[in-house]
Amino acid sequence: MLSKLFGKRSRQAAVLPRVDAGSRVYAVGDIHGRADLLRALRQMIHEDAYAAQAPRNVVVYLGDYVDRGDASRAVIDCLLDERLPGFEEVHLLGNHEDSMLRFLTDLEIGPAWLAYGGAATLCSYGVAPPTSERELARAQDELHRKLPQRHLDFLRRLKLSHCEGDYFFVHAGARPGVSLAAQAPEDMLWIRDEFLRSDAEFGKVVVHGHTITDLPEVKRNRIGIDTGAFASGTLTCLALWDADWKFLQT
């Protein structure tokens, strides 16, 4: 199956993408306020890693921890306080965290953020969602007061991308024709059609979330693992080791 999907990229290239020897890498898709699913999936990751006994374990979260589901605050608490023992942890920035941060300083993004899930995040922090544009300033002020400093610090530390071996991890994707090192933050957080429809090689296999599919989507140049956990109840993890991989799902 793997050889059919990836094949040889060039006469010089390896047949299959791989992560560094001795590493076991887990990528977690969009959580969106489902702390219950996050805890269940983390237990599955822990058990899988324990069985494998790799010298190095790392988990990469692809962003969109907040919005839509009703436990955004609990998700961030879980990520901060319930770290997987013996794991390196990498937290990437999603467009929803970016929008949440922008709302703290820019009221103009408020209506758009609320429309695609921000109201649920406000509720999780004990802030009543605004019922009119005149209430945006009130909601912004309350969020400033009720958002724990450690949550704000966490959001501000989120990375745009991460690499492991032949894989590039990012929230939304990458713009075809642009090197991975030169990708614009806007594209890494928001891109859809230009990326999803492209069969271009990026130099690495791009592992991403952001675009919901019923099942994980595996292409020659990308693997999408956003399975709409907030509504479907299915939170997906891609596990990678050497030249092999599998999916773990709630």
Image (tube, rainbow, N blue to C red):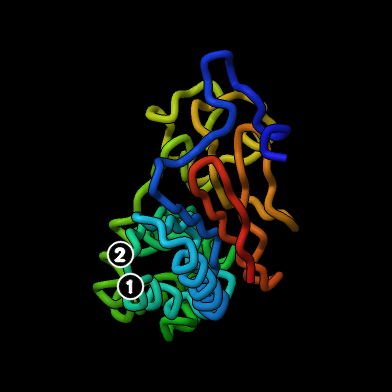
Residue 114 percent across, percent down from the top left: 54, 67
Who is closer to the viewer here, 169 or 178? 169
Q: Residue at x 66, y 68 (%)?
A: 234
How far is mark 2 from mark 1, CA to CA?
Answer: 8 Å
Neighbour tally class for label 1: few under 14, some 14-19, many 20 plus, Cα within 10 Å: few
Q: Amino acid at mark 1?
A: Leu
> Quick check: marks 2 and 1 in contact, CB under 8 Å?
yes
The quadrant of the rendering that contains the C terminus is bottom right
Q: Residue at x 43, y 55 (%)?
A: 60
In the figure, residue 8 lies in which quadrant? Answer: top right
Q: Residue at x 49, y 67 (%)?
A: 51
Neighbour tally class for label 2: few under 14, some 14-19, many 20 plus, Cα within 10 Å: some
Residue 163 percent across, percent down from the top left: 40, 41
Q: Amino acid at mark 2?
A: Phe
Q: Secondary structure at mark 1?
A: helix
Q: Nearer the viewer, mark 2 or mark 1?
A: 1
Who is closer to the viewer here, 130 or 46? 46
Vertical placement of 211 versus 19: above or below?
A: below
The mark that comes first in sequence, 2 or 1, is 1
The quadrant of the rendering that contains the N terminus is top right
Q: Secondary structure at mark 2?
A: helix
Q: What residue is disc 1 on?
A: 80
Q: What residue is disc 2 on?
A: 154
Who is closer to the viewer here, 194 or 8? 8
Residue 130 shows in this picture: no
